[in-house]
Image (cartoon, rainbow, N blue to C red):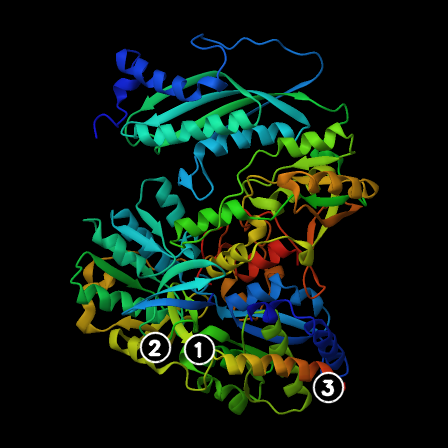
Amino acid sequence: MDKNTIFLSHGSGGKQSQELLELIYNTLNEVVINHGEDSGVFQAVEGKAAITTDSYTVDPIFFPGGNIGKLAICGTTNDLAMVGAIPKLITLSLMIEEGFSFDDLNKILISIKDETKKGNISIIAGDTKIVSRGKIDKIFINTAGYGVLATNESISSKNAKPQDDVIITGDIGDHGASIMAYRNGFESSLKSDCANVAPLIKALLEQEAIIHALRDPTRGGLASILNEIVASSKVNIILEEERLPIKESVSGVCDALGIDPLYMACEGRAVIICPQDETNEVLKILHNEPLGSNAQVIGRVTERSDTPKLFLKTFIGAKRILPLLSREQTPRIC
Amino acid sequence: MSDKFRNNPELKPLLKKIKNEVVALDGKALPLKFMEVCGTHTVSILKFGFRHFFKDSIKFLSGPGCPVCVTSTKDIDKIIFLAQQGHHIVTFGDLIKVPGTHSSLEKEVAKGALVSVVYSPLDALKIAKITSKEVIFIAVGFETTIPSIASLVLDAYAQQINNISILCLVKTMPNVLKYLLSQLQGEIDGFIMPGHVSVIIGAEPYEFIPKEYNIPCTVAGFEPVDLGLGVESLVSQIKNKNPFVDNRYTRMVKPEGNRAAQELISVVFQECDVSWRGFGSIPNSGLCVIEEFKQFDAEKKFQIEVKDEVVQSACICGDIIAGKKSPLDCTLFRKKCTPENPIGPCMVSFEGACAAYYKYGE
Amino acid sequence: MCLAVPYRIISKDGNKAIADVFGMKKEIDIRIIEDVEIDEYVLVHAGFAIQRVNQEDAKETLELLTELCEAEE
């Protein structure tokens, strides 16, 4: 057990720190550049670039379909993709609780390496801290991502226009529902959809598809992200319940726990808002990509409004509002 | 099979027919007022769009069937007191944000209180087995939930787990309905009875509603087809001037209910008078733990010291639960009382009338 | 006040059963459902089975929907 355990001394700068760093570099070797320097140096490209930062504190750290490491890389690449940037570089800061196991750290690092390699990106800078037991929960990861803009058009939450179509690149709620199911003792084959969607967006931009807005529906799910878009663009959007792609197992666990799949996080999906006459082209490009095979139109931007709202047309043809929830959903009995 | 009760192509035509029938009713002021007793019905009616569909023809009023909404501030203060004493509080997610006089469980967690949210009361026993602290399960709910809470007590007794108890805040339906009707005669055109409470108690306890008050009743389920059939039944009863208790949820509800569940409940609990937010004390409207199991009754096990509640004069949750007023009548609604800063449980609870009105834009 | 959904029984062991809801499996308590059978559907609330689902009545309810739909106004 001792050999497998990370102690405070692994973060104190001495011999044990070297051992920890060796493990990290050995596992991440092929995706790390600028080994051993205080800062990562790179050749900046001409034109616009994008930078994002995020921290990952997911619980449980290992979940069906992924772990905190995979989530950290995909979350970062996806944030860059949402402004039309091609991800190039990432920084990786690990905060590890005293007592964490080397085995678990290794599994997380392998996932980080795999996703970084798949995404054609490199880790340019990193940091490791070991924190006293109880001061953090197992492991937290912080990243910064750098990407190069692949379009001169402004893709922004402020740009949704009346009559635009609203497209989702795949099934809704898989990540949030799989975590809820796991936490509440449900066994299933339901997995997180955690994935890097940058290739999907790259394909769209390379073929010069016209896109007005792009968002990934992570925390708070589809309904929350669309609420942000209606507020930024000052437009109403109406979704059609019949057109929402939701897996039966996601519906099932949501029904059982009293939670709404429209507010469940997706970690490998993008919401695309584009002019109606671009829709066929956008769908064609998405359907050609592995992650976009189930992409579909789920709604439409209707009119401008000073009190913008997100609506849902239900199965019975009635309209209701999808509000911004003030809190995270917990399982209900009512 | 389940999907046929949710997304059924025959439902829309039926609902259109119902709307036409309502409009054609003789001598009835519109909109009709139907009260759904159960909070889960409130959510389903909103979620599936029934409220919007029947906008001018049927108004749906939320009744007292939201266990969070009807828990008194004093009872919430008892929960906070126990959390502050350092006990491990185990609760359904519904209760986490409900404000007491000064605090809420959520606020106590931020201050270091031990609180676990569970899906099933029986999970509390699993927690008790791996801690030396006293585990206190906050027992809120109606008859649907009470059999599982009774099982928790019986299992703790059988397995001799001594570091567990329940704070018994459960309530029962029939007598609160009697109380409600004594206040509301003539103001409600029909009742949608709680489908899953009825699974336990049956449809027979509601017989007094058409008999003594001449008001139509239907026991309905929660899927769109079930709600549609429930509304159809009420409109039909109004049209035929023939109110009775119609069971439209026969696949789950028997006239006598579930006898095994009723027996299980009676092994652990007995009827007693309990306090309902907005109504005060109603005789025999709740349950308390019988003497034989008092070691599992947190009120007997611990000295719980809370002050009597100071009623916030401007909060009209009680009148809203009773169907007398709407959130729009409340001076605090949307101004001082919002989902981010809820004053009363009707705003905190996911299915509370005020939260629903606020969120769904009424 | 009562969120409950039908689950299908996969296996039993005394008071407990493993049951399935759309591919998600969970342990539930079945003590108040007498002689529950494998593949039978039970209504589950907060991890506790509170009634068996009567499939005949389910069919009749759907037939009622059809009948009301087709009836003259």
Task: Give the image location of residue B227, x and y in percent.
Answer: 60, 73
The front one of A210 and B168 is A210
Q: Quadrant of residue C24?
A: bottom left
Residue on which the image places disc 2: B261
Mark 3 vs mark 2: tell me if same chain: no
In the rendered structure, the residue with mark 1 lies on which chain? B
**Residue C7, image quadrant:** bottom left
Q: Position of residue A300 (x, y in %)?
A: 75, 48
* Farthest residue, direction right: A277
Say which residue label 3 marks: C71
User: Which mark, by number, is residue B199?
Assistant: 1
Query: 10 Å neighbourhood of mark 2: few (<14), some, or many (≥20)?
Result: many
Q: Would you identify the image quadrant in which residue B95 lies?
A: bottom left
Point 32% across, 68% down: residue: C12
Nearer the camera: disc 3 or disc 2: 3
Determine which of the numbered discs, if any, sits on residue C66 in the image: none
Disc 2 to disc 1, how far (Cα)? 9 Å
Q: Are marks 2 and 1 on the same chain?
A: yes
Residue type beneath disc 2 = Ala
Task: Kindly indicate whether the residue at mark 2 contacts the one at mark 3 (C-beta within 8 angstroms).
Answer: no
Look at the numbered disc 3 and give the secondary structure of its residue.
Answer: loop
Name the amino acid, label 3: Ala
- Report the quarter where the N terminus of chain B lies: bottom right
Tag 1's secondary structure? Answer: helix
Chain where mark 2 sits: B
| Above or below, comparing residue B238 to residue A170 in the picture | below
Q: CA distance from mark 3 to mark 2?
A: 39 Å
The reply to whether label 3 and label 1 mark residues of one chain is no
The foreground one among B74 and A102 is A102
Contact, mark 2 vs mark 1 (Cβ under 8 Å): yes
